[in-house]
Image (tube, rainbow, N blue to C red):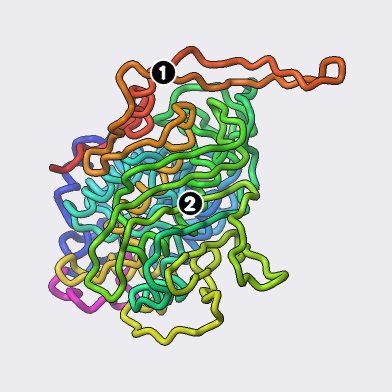
Amino acid sequence: MIKKDSKEISRRNFIGKSTVAMAGFTILPSNVISGFGYKAPSDKLNIVGVGVGGMGFSNLKRMSSENIVGLCDVDWKYSDRVFKHFPKAKKYKDFRKMYDEMGKSIDAVMVATADHTHATVAANAIAMGKHVYVQKPLTHTVYESRLLTNLTNKHKVATQMGNQGASGEGVNLITEWLANNEIGEVTKVEAFTDRPIWPQGQPRPEGTTPPDTLDWDLFLGPAKKRPYNPIYTPWNWRGWWDFGTGALGDMACHILHPVFVGLELGYPTSVQGSSTLLLSDSAPNAEKVTLTFPKRKSNLKMGLPEVEVTWFDGGLQPNKPEGWPDGKSMNDSGGGVMFHGTKDTLICGCYGVEPWLLSGRVPNAPKFRRRIEVNHEQDWIRAAKESPKNRVESSSSFNEAGPFNEMVVMGVLAVRLQNLNKELQWDGKNMKFTNINDDETIRIIKKDNFSIHDGHPTFNKEWTDPINAKQFAEELIKHNYEQGWTLPDMPK
């Protein structure tokens, strides 16, 4: 829980409105730095990291132009190299304690925990007036994404999701080509990733004793209690529903970003998913999801008709279109995207890299997107040093990343609700499905217990009891947190 004194801090904007309490560090007032986007080298942000053992370490190293003053991770063995790299930073296992003790002296928070704790770490930081950088996927649920978006708008902080392709040239070119009507109207998009490269499609393992260096209860955080097993963490939590979002959630924030931005997508109207064996605890080995988006208005040259966006993972790929170069792999840097237009087909890799047209023509479209001259993390730091009135938003601020992440986790919902055996209709504004009836139930396999009996494949499947589908969907849209873990209220 965040203590009262930390809540009082939430009424402040630490960039330009307070003096940092730590000796030797000062923050210039907003009337000095407003609109310039930089400060003297001695005036740096005080940044803390939450979830630092994995990708968080990479992020923090790219932020080392600033003062890294606090490090928090539930696994101190995994994080030992990070502690040694930043020896002056205070060490914590519980971010709530860190916020209570350091809340008055920090300006910004980098979040790279497991997916299921992104929202509670980030939302409470924003409510305290802190700038936040959050690894992808932004959140575990639709509601959490909406919350971070609205909190960002309320508190006027600088934000960034860790989909670094948003700061790359590929996304810029794709957006500009589409806007210039280079491939005509797009009614179909196909995208894929070569992930997972971590365990998926497995039943819940037996519990064992956690190592002394790991606080298992803190890792679980707002998720339901379960015994520890080394298959869960570090890193492999991605494949477990309670902690991660599978290959789709992990990689679509990279791969579908140019789709969301370039086609000016909003809320989908319908979604349906299918997969290999769907289990109650672990994401399947391969998935296919189709989201339908309605016709949209644009002030640019392109028309925006209804469009279907289809996602593949687990080794699945869309068919190669007519005219595809023989021998050319569709996989570039971990995945790929095809925009099927009425005049041409636009292809790119993961992160939007290396866009090209199937016709071989090279577009010469007007360049209207801001080019990022620094790395993704430094673009966020720049934004944090600008006043809200004059701030140029970062390349993947929550105003964009929040709605985009809703699209991503909507795909996860479609997979987890596939046993309803129908296309699901979505009311994006109100965050609910409109065609799941009150009395519908689903059952999900816990274990398939496959064996060979007299030369024949045999299954002795263990199923969950019937689950009310509407209540299950509502819990997936907005989690009920375990006691002791909270989110700020949704701004009105």
Which residue is label 2 attached to? Answer: 310
How packed is label 1: few (under 14 Cα within 10 Å), some, or many (20 or more)? some
As drawn, the residue found furthest toward the top would be 465
The image shows residue 354 at horizontal and vertical percentages of 54, 74
Kind of element beneath mark 2: strand
Residue drawn at x 38%, y 84% as measured from the top left = 365
Is residue 242 among what the camera can see?
A: no
Q: Nearer the viewer, residue 303 or 356?
A: 303
As drawn, the residue found furthest toward the right would be 454
Is residue 104 among what the camera can see?
A: yes
Q: Is 40 placed above or below 438 here?
A: below
**Residue 213's mark?**
none
Q: Are marks 1 and 2 in contact (CB under 8 Å)?
A: no
Q: Is residue 223 magenta?
A: no
Q: Is residue 36 magenta?
A: yes
Residue drawn at x 54%, y 78% as measured from the top left = 359
Q: Earlier in the sequence, mark 1 or mark 2?
A: 2
As drawn, the residue found furthest toward the bottom would be 364
Left or right of 455 in this view: 168: left
- Give the main secondary structure, helix, strand or loop, of the magenta stretch: loop
- Quarter occupied by the C terminus: top left
Q: Nearer the viewer, residue 83 or 200?
A: 200
- Under mark 2, the amino acid is Thr
The image shows residue 376 at horizontal and vertical percentages of 42, 67
The part of the chain drawn in magenta is 30-47
Q: Is 143 placed above or below 43 here?
A: above
